[in-house]
Amino acid sequence: MSDGGAAHDVAGEEALETIAGLGRFNRWMYETIRPSCHGRLLEVGSGIGNLSQCFLDDGADLVMSDLRPAYVRRLEARFPGREVCSLDLVSPRFTTDAARHLGRYDTVFALNVVEHIADDVLALENCRRLVRPGGTVLVLVPAYEALHNRLDVELGHFRRYTRGTLSAAFGRAGLSVSRAFHFNAVATVGWAVTGGLLARPRIPTVEATLFDRLVPAWRLVDRLLGHRVGLSVIAVGVA
């Protein structure tokens, strides 16, 4: 999971390093999106490979990508022999730069990426161009504009979403939404307190580690709430 800017991203890299240590959380996110991912996969914004590792451990046919050269190098070093590429979803030369990837994938997924891109509809349009006809585009983004706080600013988020606004962006990009739902309800409180009430610029490692230990309880909360609320919103679209 990475963001859409090419410059060095201190806050984003620190967040990825923190999340890398959250094994239960990463597995939860992976198990939430995996049923919607099929065939040959492209991960947009792989970052340092937190979710990539889960897919590869389960034998997925996965190509990883990132915009930032430093992350591409880290992915190549971490996963030798695996295909890693540089990809800019909003490049004015996208169809030329990404020519060998167009229409190549059954599923393209981008986790915590689209909120970093000013023209989110263009980014989604280009995700659609990467999949075969009838292919799947899956996106996970932060939810609720009311939660936008210092953490969002530090991480370079242009916006947060609802199921409605994300589905609308999918529609404008030529994608038909088959499912939209929330993920990680309990963390909405932590985000509001950490980045809003306390105005902290970083995700605290101690609190994140405690959260990870209690993931089985948080998963139960999401099931009980029917995935109707959560810190993130996930949309699955068909090209």
Image (spheres, grey):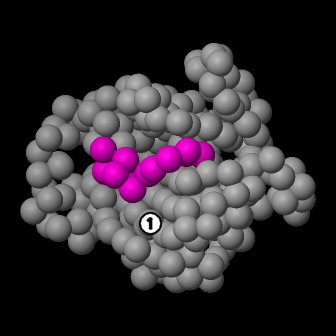
* Residue topped by disc 1: 236
Dividing the picture into quarters, in which one does residue 215 lie?
top left
Q: Who is closer to the viewer here, 166 or 21?
A: 166
Which residues make up the magenta segment? 31-42
Q: Is residue 37 magenta?
A: yes
Does residue 128 appear anywhere in the picture? yes
Q: Residue at x 36, y 43 (%)?
A: 30
Q: Position of residue 193 (x, y in %)?
A: 31, 55
Answer left or right for 231 relative to 3.
left
Q: Who is closer to the viewer here, 105 or 30?
A: 105
Q: Amino acid at mark 1?
A: Val
Please determine whether, in this image, residue 225 is positioned above or below residue 197: below
SS for dot 1: strand
Please determine whether, in this image, residue 133 is positioned above or below residue 203: below
Q: Position of residue 100 (x, y in %)?
A: 80, 47
Answer left or right for 221 relative to 38.
left
Please determine whether, in this image, residue 164 is positioned above or below residue 115: below
Please determine whether, in this image, residue 74 is positioned above or below residue 65: above
